[in-house]
Amino acid sequence: MGRRGQNAFLVVELRPEFLLCQIDSVLCRLKLEVQRLKLGISRPKQLDHLAAAHFCRAEFRLARPRQHFQTLPVQHSEPEIPELNELSLEFRSSFDPPRMDVHVYDDDPSRRFILVDLKRFVEGDTLDSGAKLEKIQPESIQLYYQGTRFLYDR
């Protein structure tokens, strides 16, 4: 490691596959190495090392009891909504796409609207084609038609 008066470094790499008990063991070995360096002992005997590690582990557990980990709720991401051009040819041929004259998006949902054939529609309205306008997004609208939800670019 080094002579007295020189700086010595001990690098411990913790990988995700370590279990908590392995982390305890690494911390105990690290503590033992620090004590060994302070005392200037070059190489401890194997039995002394094991006894010291065992003592260190017990001391560490008394000093820092294991904390209970909090479980976080699983966040379900919304399923990706396909665009109209990604849907089947049969579906696309049955759907008459709206001709949007104006597309207005605002952070405030009450200020969002589109003009289709110069008629104003807001979220929740049904277009003349029979599709329900579910959401107005910054670059597209989300429609629901014949049981299928999809995005239509402006």
Image (cartoon, rainbow, N blue to C red):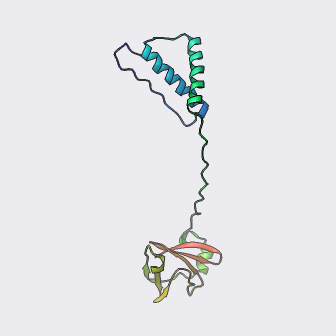
Q: Quadrant of the N terminus?
A: top left
As drawn, the residue found furthest toward the front would be 63
Question: Foreground: 105 or 75?
Answer: 75
Residue 8: which quarter of the image?
A: top left
Could you tell me residue 127's position as x and y percent?
55, 85
The image shows residue 77, relative to residue 2, as above or below, that is below
Q: How many marks do you count on the picture?
A: 0
Q: Quadrant of residue 145?
A: bottom right
> Of all residues shown, which one is farthest toward the left?
5
Can residue 19 be seen at all in this image of the molecule?
Answer: no
| Residue at x 51% of width, y 20% of height | 32
* Percent of width and height locating residue 67: 59, 39
The residue located at (39%, 15%) in the rendering is 2
Residue at 50%, 23% in the rendered image: 31
User: In the orientation shown, which residue stands out farthest toward the bottom?
Assistant: 118
- Look at the picture and state if 62 lies above or below 51: below
**Residue 54, x across and y down, in percent:** 60, 20
Q: Position of residue 70 (x, y in %)?
A: 60, 47
| Residue 13 visible to the viewer | yes
> Quadrant location of residue 4?
top left
Observer-nearest of 62 and 147: 62
Q: Please determine whether, in this image, residue 1 is positioned above or below residue 108.
A: above
Q: Is residue 120 left or right of residue 69?
A: left
